[in-house]
């Protein structure tokens, strides 16, 4: 009886192992795709933010240079107006940069958080499947051994029970 139980158990455990391996491959593939999307999106947002900051910097420098061209070095009033204007411009630019940094954070949250949540869910599924797969492999090996032991014990007695 151990032979049949072991053989059937081995068959079912082997089927479970293959099914879990297929599921693990599928989840791992999705996990890898999502991980790549998260990385690509983070890089894209960083690139956009850098480009915006460079643009802002260029605008600031151009406006400052334009203001500087109207400064007469011998006229203290025009120089003081230039200094006041530059400080005012600098404060406006800093406020705008702070607002844009907040906007980029909001964009990151809106675009990345759903992907990161999916990534975390897939990682949990992957870990779960890996654990179940290890258990199924152990069960397969145990049933295989049970089948082998049952086969050894099922050797017919050719002596007819007379010894």
Image (tube, rainbow, N blue to C red):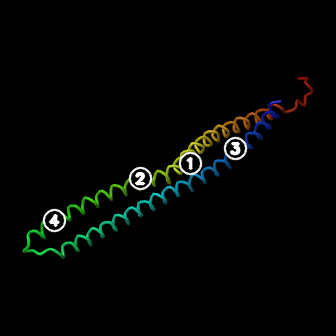
Q: Judge by depth and name the residue closer to the eye, 45 or 156.
A: 45
Outermost residue, top side: 162
Q: Which residue is mark 3?
A: 17
Q: Report crowding for label 1: few under 14, some 14 to 19, many 20 or more residues within 10 A (C-alpha).
A: some
Q: Quadrant of residue 150?
A: top right
Q: Judge by depth and name the residue closer to the eye, 56 or 83.
A: 83
Secondary structure under the numbered disc 1 in the rendered image? helix
Mark 4 or mark 3: which is in front? 4
Q: Judge by depth and name the residue closer to the eye, 90 or 85.
A: 85
Q: Which residue is mark 1?
A: 118
Mark 2 or mark 4: which is in front? 4
- Give the residue displayed 17% in from the left and 75% down from the top: 70
| Relative image position of residue 102 (x, y in whole percent) | 38, 53
- Give the residue displayed 60% in from the left and 53% down from the top: 30
Q: Which residue is mark 2?
A: 105
Query: In what quadrant of the picture does the N terminus appear?
Result: top right
Is 121 left or right of 7, judged from the image as shown? left
Distance from label 3 to label 1 (Cα)? 25 Å
Outermost residue, front side: 77
Distance from label 4 to label 1 (Cα)? 52 Å
Secondary structure under the numbered disc 3 in the rendered image? helix
In this rendering, is residue 100 above or below 132? Answer: below
Q: Report crowding for label 4: few under 14, some 14 to 19, many 20 or more residues within 10 A (C-alpha).
A: some
In this rendering, is residue 158 above or below 94? Answer: above
């Amino acid at each position: 009886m151990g032979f049949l139980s072991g053989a059937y158990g081995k068959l079912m455990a082997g089927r479970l192992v293959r099914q879990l391996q297929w599921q693990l491959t599928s989840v791992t593939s999705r996990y890898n795709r999502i991980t790549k999307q998260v990385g690509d999106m983070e890089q894209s947002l960083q690139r956009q933010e850098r480009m915006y900051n460079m643009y802002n910097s260029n605008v600031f420098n151009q406006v400052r240079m334009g203001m500087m061209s109207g400064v007469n070095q011998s006229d203290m009033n025009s120089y003081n107006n230039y200094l006041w204007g530059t400080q005012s411009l600098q404060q406006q630019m800093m406020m705008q940069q702070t607002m844009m940094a907040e906007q980029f954070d909001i964009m990151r949250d809106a675009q990345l958080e759903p992907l990161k949540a999916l990534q975390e869910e897939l990682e949990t599924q992957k870990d779960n499947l890996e654990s179940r797969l290890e258990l199924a492999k152990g069960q397969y090996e145990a049933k295989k051994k049970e089948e082998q032991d049952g086969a050894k014990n099922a050797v017919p007695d050719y002596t007819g029970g007379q010894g």
